[in-house]
Amino acid sequence: MQHELIGDETGSIDLPERGGSHRVHSWEIEAWQQSEAWGKLNVRGELEKMRAWLETHPKQLKQNTRRFVINWMNRRSTLNAGVDTSASQAAYRDRVQRAHHEEMRKPAARAEVARAALAEAMRILRS
């Protein structure tokens, strides 16, 4: 789909990037808003958030701003889709705890933990 622009386009959003700015055209914003890819995500609102973030983090300006936009939108749509991040965090915590308990079953790990605890106790007693 080819789109021609004449002058300054109303409704477009300019995002700062290394060496200039990246214009997100109004027709892109409308197409993204109507697509099913990002569900009920407020595309224009997210672009405004991106612009504010990029303006407040000038050392982190992007070269490939379009990729940055797509990745941002994908992350936000996942969060807005009702993905329970607390459940995924709990699952991660459980995996880490299981791995820790597996390590603690090994005699060398138990001995190392005991040595570290003894060293910490001695340090506390000396102070």
Image (spheres, rainbow, N blue to C red):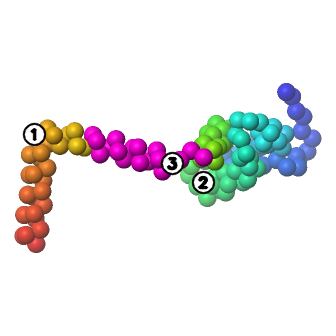
- Mark 2–mark 3 CB contact (< 8 Å): no
- Identify the mark at residue 107; answer none if there is no mark: 1
- Residue sticking out furthest to the right: 6
Q: Is residue 54 visible?
A: yes
Label 2 sits on what residue type? Pro
| x 27%, y 40%: residue | 99
Q: Earlier in the sequence, mark 1 or mark 2?
A: 2
Task: Please say if 21 is above or below 67.
Answer: below
- For label 3, the residue is 85
The segment highlighted magenta reads 82-99
Q: Is residue 24 left or right of residue 75?
A: right
Q: Can residue 47 be seen in this view?
A: no
| x 8%, y 46%: residue | 111
State the image coordinates of residue 40 (x, y, percent, origin top left): 73, 45
Task: Please say if 66 is above or below 119.
Answer: above
Label 1 sits on what residue type? Pro
